[in-house]
Amino acid sequence: MVLFTFAELIDLIIMVFAIGFIFSKIFKKPIPVSKTYDPLAHYEKKNDAFEDLKWGIIVAAPAVVFHELAHKFVAIYFGAQATLVAPVVMYAIVILMIMLKSPVIFFVGGYVTHTALPPLQSFFVSVSGPLTNLLLWFGADRILKSDHKFKKKNIEMISMTKKLNMFLFIFNMIPIPGFDGFNAIRALFNIFF
């Protein structure tokens, strides 16, 4: 059995770069503060595009990619055929909105389609993505609370990762149609009724 098709690998690469780019434009990489105070230095220093993209990929892509891979692998575990999809048109719309400096930003990380499963298995597929974000959130929290001394830039990165995974967990568990929370509740409803 093949875990990833060629198309899925292409979608995965597109997903990583699109999410990294979008995240880097919405949440800017912190500019290092010099030891001497200069109130205008923040406006003079510019991070280059590659560094911003790298920041976005390191901080945001794992949260979304692992979330979607959890859905895929749990569906496969239960015997379904599952396909990872990068919503390229949605990425293009969001990137266009960013370029036009639109105040309205919406975001779709990706999604997994799979063949039909019984309600209990569907429940586990639905919650697997948000639970992955929950684990990443707690993992980042534990790292930040550890005695290990990190460089300031790494602390900022881990802190942003923690906040993003907290947001993704809570946001995805909202019981609105199309969200993981709704799919989980619908699966539970189908189990008991």
Image: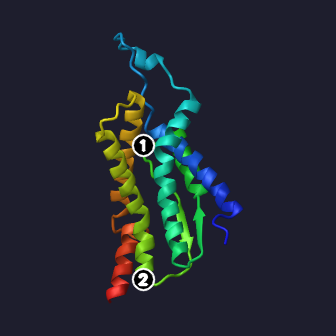
Crowding near the residue tagged with mark 2, few <14, some 14–19, many ≥20 C-alpha atoms within 10 Å: some
**Which is more toward the observer, 135 or 193?**
135
Question: Which element is circle 1 on?
Answer: loop
Crowding near the residue tagged with mark 1, few <14, some 14–19, many ≥20 C-alpha atoms within 10 Å: few
Q: Position of residue 111 (x, y in %)?
A: 52, 63
Q: Is residue 109 above or below residue 34?
A: below
Q: Is 153 situated left or right of 97 in this image?
A: left
Q: Is residue 57 above or below residue 90?
A: above
Q: Amino acid at mark 1?
A: Pro
Q: Is 115 situated left or right of 149 in this image?
A: right
Question: Which element is circle 2 on?
Answer: helix
Can see residue 108? Answer: no
Q: Is residue 2 above or below residue 78?
A: above
Residue sitting farthest toward the front: 147
Q: Is 122 situated left or right of 80 in this image?
A: left
Q: Amino acid at mark 2?
A: Pro
Q: In which quadrant of the rendered image does the N terminus lie? A: bottom right
Q: CA distance from mark 1 to mark 2?
A: 39 Å
Residue at 42% from the left image edge and 30% from the top image edge: 153
Q: Position of residue 137 (x, y in %)?
A: 35, 51
Q: Which residue is mark 1?
A: 103
Q: Is residue 182 above or below residue 45?
A: below
What colouring does the structure picture have?
rainbow
Residue at 39% from the left image edge and 79% from the top image edge: 187
Q: Position of residue 13 (x, y in %)?
A: 63, 51
Residue at 35% from the left image edge and 64% from the top image edge: 173
Q: Position of residue 10 (x, y in %)?
A: 67, 55
Residue sitting farthest toward the bottom: 193
Which mark identifies residue 69? none
Q: Which residue is mark 2?
A: 119
The reply to whether the C-beta atoms of the residues labelled 1 and 2 are less than 8 Å apart is no
Q: In which quadrant of the rendered image does the C terminus lie? A: bottom left
